[in-house]
Image: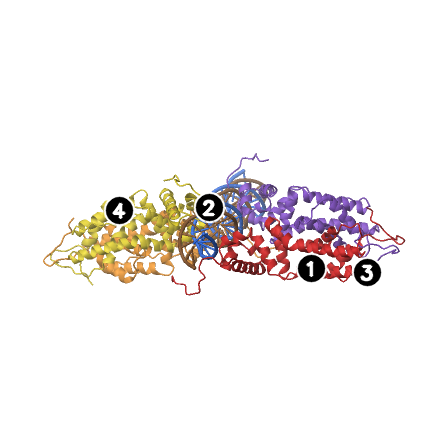
Chain colours: A purple, B red, C orange, D yellow, E brown, F blue
Amino acid sequence: MTSQPSPRRGRGRRPAAEVREGVLRAAAGLLLAEGVKAVTFDRVAAAAGSSKVTLYKWWPSAGALAAEAYFTHSEQRLEFPDTGDLRADLTAQMRAFVRLLTEDRTGPVIAGLIGVAQTDPELSAAFSRHYSGPRRALALATFEKARARGELRDDLDLRILVDQLWGACYHRLLIPDEPLTEEFAVALVDNALDGALARRPGDPDEAPAA
Amino acid sequence: MTSQPSPRRGRGRRPAAEVREGVLRAAAGLLLAEGVKAVTFDRVAAAAGSSKVTLYKWWPSAGALAAEAYFTHSEQRLEFPDTGDLRADLTAQMRAFVRLLTEDRTGPVIAGLIGVAQTDPELSAAFSRHYSGPRRALALATFEKARARGELRDDLDLRILVDQLWGACYHRLLIPDEPLTEEFAVALVDNALDGALARRPGDPDEAPAA
Amino acid sequence: MTSQPSPRRGRGRRPAAEVREGVLRAAAGLLLAEGVKAVTFDRVAAAAGSSKVTLYKWWPSAGALAAEAYFTHSEQRLEFPDTGDLRADLTAQMRAFVRLLTEDRTGPVIAGLIGVAQTDPELSAAFSRHYSGPRRALALATFEKARARGELRDDLDLRILVDQLWGACYHRLLIPDEPLTEEFAVALVDNALDGALARRPGDPDEAPAA
Amino acid sequence: MTSQPSPRRGRGRRPAAEVREGVLRAAAGLLLAEGVKAVTFDRVAAAAGSSKVTLYKWWPSAGALAAEAYFTHSEQRLEFPDTGDLRADLTAQMRAFVRLLTEDRTGPVIAGLIGVAQTDPELSAAFSRHYSGPRRALALATFEKARARGELRDDLDLRILVDQLWGACYHRLLIPDEPLTEEFAVALVDNALDGALARRPGDPDEAPAA
DNA sequence: TCGTAAACGAGACGGTACGTCACGTCTTTAG
DNA sequence: CTAAAGACGTGACGTACCGTCTCGTTTACGA
């Protein structure tokens, strides 16, 4: 993998795919080993044996390169369990998400990417397109199926439910005032499904005040 | 040429408070005008007419300096309405928070600070201590009063409620896949209080599955 | 978008002469407009709509290309007046040369070419072959005719006379400590013909010491 | 010379003189070893263990740095023999000049500096100030003394005589159509002093045509 | 006449150098 | 004695040009 099996020729053009592959591999290595700050055009170019100009030609910013490297070199497990029991499915999903975010390398990487995205519009766009967007869409689809089954209220804005659940996890990741644990994930799902209000006896069907 | 006719302040020692004040003012100016990325030790020192060494002496990182500058030079409205009606109070609070985050200058600044904090532990600590910590504590206290009034369930982890509400807003600020509006804030509060589950007729008191 | 309505000749082979012509024209344009430094293979190729490989195939260096472009696209006035009066002819010639060197565009171009030639042997050779060599030969021929008429000393090394005259002009062009004017040209010819030594009265025929 | 005797400390500021000295030494090494083209800010900074910013702060261009390095690290023999016999003194001086220009390293260096000066005004100025200017002034002074002694014509423009002599040498250096030898130097002086015109018997005092 | 080889345009590639900005460390100098 | 001033080494930025090389296209020649 690190050995170059082909007899490396001179300085001329190489197949684009080969170069991209090498660059992304190098960027992913730096990203996982030293974090987002280490993913600079200079260092990636040096590590990949590529030219800086090549990187500038294909990625609009170092952050965007880091993002693509991460998305490419991380298994993209997008599956969402769908057993027909929303609470169980959601709990499993959020626990898995928390596990991902608290992994030694993944957590800081995701946090770092989101961090850099605040001042790097290109990275922000890449993150939405390749990461948060698809995940949000998948969650929405699951919620819609649950609503069709009658598990969720009809008047609910499902998109907000996404923010309540995933946003809460990101909150604890990015602003770590409280720990991010699987217990948190479980309780979070219950909170979101059941609501925070106390239900008084003799209150048969407490519709939202709207 | 060699004479500077202006009332040159010279290079000797100046009162610490005077220096700190000037530095923070300069940093705040840069922060609001050009964003977090512009708050570098070099530029702040130049703008404040101070020495870089002085800055290094008092702030552990440029991010920490930016944070302190922001906290110092922004009105810190920590008041939380408490009329006895939790839904109304909370809605007002979240609407105000969303308004703050969508202000032209404040939103990007907050986002930028959180962004930099992901790779700047000093800034992260400062942000928790001076900003997110107090706000979380205030919210918790309000929730506890509401629970004492019987408005909230006894078995609720109130801290998670904070993540659900504020985290959802931060989510839309930091990962802008969906717009951050006051309507969102209103619906968010309802979601959190009432829960997402559909309530079937004849289901008098739907306790959480626990 | 994908259709090019213009009679696009495509990218295939074109007649060599046509390509060379276009390249030289583009190079001359860059040379006169922005100086020798602007004549790079990259910019000429872009301006001429040619491929860099084509340029590399025909010119050994950017300097050589610039030289050929200049020689091709500048009127080559090689005429040397020959009225039988050497002083008058030479004065006219040197005045014309100074005028050429002090023209807005020509002077810097010639100076730039000589400058680049110091580190570009290909350009140096091209300059000698196409420019300085013919001019030196022409001057020599004129001097030889004058010597045959008895105007110049028999023991004179005529080649050195060329260096004295043209070299002095190039000196003021390339190392501009003193201005390059037509008055200079006139006095220069007198100096060269009459010598610098004072002639004492009663010194009827001061032969050179040699 | 290449060993660093002092225990090199961290990254902080070093005495300016020490830095300048090291930079000039490194630049001179590159200049003599590989020519003017090798004197780039990047390579000098690397060779001297200095920062590029430092070089940019003190030298306006790589050429100016090369020039200063050359002037500093080459013995500056400005003496001009003055025995009272102008022809002898001048011959000695021009032979020495030609020897200098034909030395293995000095000739190409001087030629290269003049070459780069054509597109580097800073270098051009430095060259005039530190090199050609003083030499021209010294030659002028010598000529004036000779004229005071009656050796040179009163109506002579001595500055032009300088161009005739030194310019001829530079001509053969920069546009090498003819060889640059000591014989050339000797004959050049005779040419310049005695003039090129044939003197007919009975032509006692051939005044310049004025 | 019809492939086919040559030459073309386009432009990406690995490099080197450019000139700038910020970092964190250090010396110098003035109050 | 201390603070301001600011130069230092480091390293990243984004760009220009170098000379090499791949690619697809088109012309012109030879079979």
Label 1 resides on the chain identified as: B
Q: Which residue is mark 4?
A: D98
**Image mark 2: chain:** D
Residue type marked 3: Ala
What residue does disc 3 label?
Answer: A209
Q: CA distance from mark 2 to mark 3?
A: 66 Å
Earlier sequence position, callout 4 versus callout 2: 2
In the picture provided, is D210 more to the left or to the right than B148?
left
Residue hosting label 2? D11
Kindly report which numbered mark, 1 or 4, lies closer to the viewer in this rendering: 1
Left or right placement of residue C41 versus residue C106 in this view: right
Residue located 62% across and 61% down the image: B74
Report how far apart the C-alphas of labels 1 and 3 lie in the structure: 22 Å
Task: Kindly identify which numbered label has been placed on residue B97.
Answer: 1
| Mark 1 residue type | Phe
- 3D distance between C-alphas at marks 4 and 2: 46 Å
Q: Position of residue B59 (x, y in %)?
A: 55, 52
Give the percent coordinates (x, y) of residue A143.
78, 50
Q: Secondary structure at mark 2?
A: loop
* Mark 3 neighbour class, 10 Å CA radius: few under 14, some 14 to 19, many 20 or more: few
Q: CA distance from mark 4 to mark 3?
A: 103 Å
Q: In this rendered view, identify the residue nearer to me: E10 or B3.
A: B3
- On the question of residue C156 being in view, the answer is no
Q: Quadrant of residue D8?
A: top left
Q: Nearest the camera: C85 or C126?
A: C126
Residue at 64 percent across and 48 percent down: it is: A111
